């Protein structure tokens, strides 16, 4: 519910995958101004060791907070959320964080065949956090974790309007044993980038299945968190509100304009806030 207050929320991902979450937040929490940081200097996060990722994200958040008041931060990335959300909360205890984790709990409720495909980066798919979710919510199910190498890059291309390499997308599902693939009735999107590839993944799967995207549950959670906060001290700031910030220059950034506008971002800028201040220890 719109409380008339100006809220400002930071979203951070390794690239533009988190725009799937931003779009859900626009719908569910339209009163929140968003600052989106695409940390493309460090893309992909899937390859980074957890301590590096934790220091990098804490550094980014500190640097942003040195300039503007934030009401909350959304780690719009499963890889970072499953690996370092606890560290971030500890390092920045006065800022509410909302993370994105693969919706395995929902899969446990809706899968009938009990054969579920988890599509995620290697870091997420192998994380103890995900093992715990599977043990808690899908103990009786077969959870397939195909190699999703290259999929986030394909999503980045799609949002730039560039041609896709269909073979990369096909190979993810083709790598599964045929009998198990045919039994999959639920696909868990465990990476925010993959939400943009649902039609292609659906086609590659070859039969109808339910695709579970955590974006809207994250937006609902953010709405709850914001509703529980005291009145914000931050007036609207045209220089920062609804700005998408990239941490590295890239010849193709201009191609992202239509996708950024669709997700409600009015301006883009190039700046690495992570370099402005030392990372938090
Ligand atoms: N969007 C990120 C996620 O949700 C992953 C992409 C990457 O590896 O950087 O996991």
Image: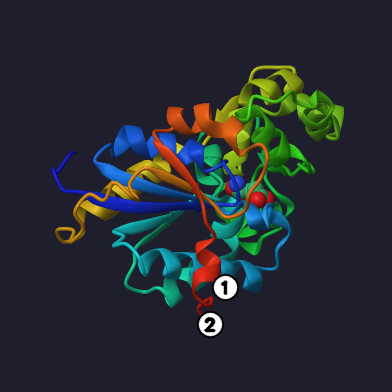
The image position of residue 156, as x and y in percent, is 65, 36
Residue 261 vs residue 145: left or right? left
Gap in Å between the C-alphas at discs 2 and 1?
7 Å
- Mark 1 nearby-residue class (10 Å; few <14, some 14–19, many ≥20): some
The answer to whether 226 is drawn above or below residue 65 in the figure is above
What element does badge 2 sit on? loop
Residue 264 vs residue 234: left or right? right
The answer to whether 31 is drawn above or below residue 95 in the figure is above
The image position of residue 113, as x and y in percent, is 65, 29
Q: Nearer the viewer, residue 145 or 249?
A: 249
What element does badge 1 sit on? helix
Residue contact at pointers 2 and 1, CB within 8 angstroms? yes
Q: Which residue is drawn at 61% across and 66% down?
A: 53
Q: Which of 186 and 109 is in front in this view?
A: 186
Q: Does ligand 1 reach within 8 Å of label 1's beta carbon?
A: no
Q: Which residue is drawn at 77% across and 24% down?
A: 182
Q: Residue at x 45, y 76 (%)?
A: 91
Residue 39 vs residue 20: left or right? right
Q: Residue at x 83, y 34 (%)?
A: 176
Residue denoted by label 2: 281
If you read the primary sequence from the N terminus, does the residue marked by circle 2 or circle 1 appear first?
A: 1
The image position of residue 223, as x and y in percent, is 28, 46
Which quarter of the picture shows residue 147? top right
- Mark 2 nearby-residue class (10 Å; few <14, some 14–19, many ≥20): few
Q: In which quarter of the image is the N terminus?
A: top left
Residue denoted by label 1: 55
């Amino acid at each position: 519910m719109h409380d008339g207050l100006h809220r400002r929320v930071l979203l951070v991902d390794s690239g533009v995958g988190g725009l799937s979450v931003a779009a859900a937040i626009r719908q569910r929490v339209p009163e929140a101004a968003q600052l989106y940081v695409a940390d493309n200097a460090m893309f992909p996060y899937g390859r980074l060791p957890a301590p590096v990722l934790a220091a990098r994200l804490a550094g980014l958040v500190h640097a942003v907070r040195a300039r503007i008041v934030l009401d909350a931060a959304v780690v719009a990335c499963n890889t970072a959320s499953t690996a370092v959300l606890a560290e971030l909360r500890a390092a920045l205890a006065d800022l509410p964080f909302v993370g994105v984790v693969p919706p395995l709990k929902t899969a446990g409720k809706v899968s009938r065949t009990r054969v579920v495909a988890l599509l995620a980066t290697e870091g997420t798919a192998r994380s103890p956090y995900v093992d715990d979710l599977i043990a808690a919510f899908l103990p009786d199910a077969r959870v397939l974790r195909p190699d999703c190498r290259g999929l986030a890059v394909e999503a980045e291309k799609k949002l730039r309007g560039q041609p896709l390499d269909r073979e990369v997308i096909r190979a993810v599902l083709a790598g599964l044993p045929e009998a198990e693939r045919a039994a999959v009735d639920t696909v868990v999107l465990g990476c925010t980038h993959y939400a943009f590839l649902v039609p292609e993944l659906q086609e590659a799967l070859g039969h109808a299945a339910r695709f579970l995207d955590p974006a809207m549950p994250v937006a609902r959670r953010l709405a709850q968190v914001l509703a529980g906060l005291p009145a914000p001290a931050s007036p609207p700031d045209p220089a920062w509100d609804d700005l998408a910030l990239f941490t590295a220059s890239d010849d193709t950034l201009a191609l992202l304009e239509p996708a950024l506008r669709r997700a409600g971002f009015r301006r883009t800028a190039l700046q690495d806030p992570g370099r402005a201040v030392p990372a938090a220890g």
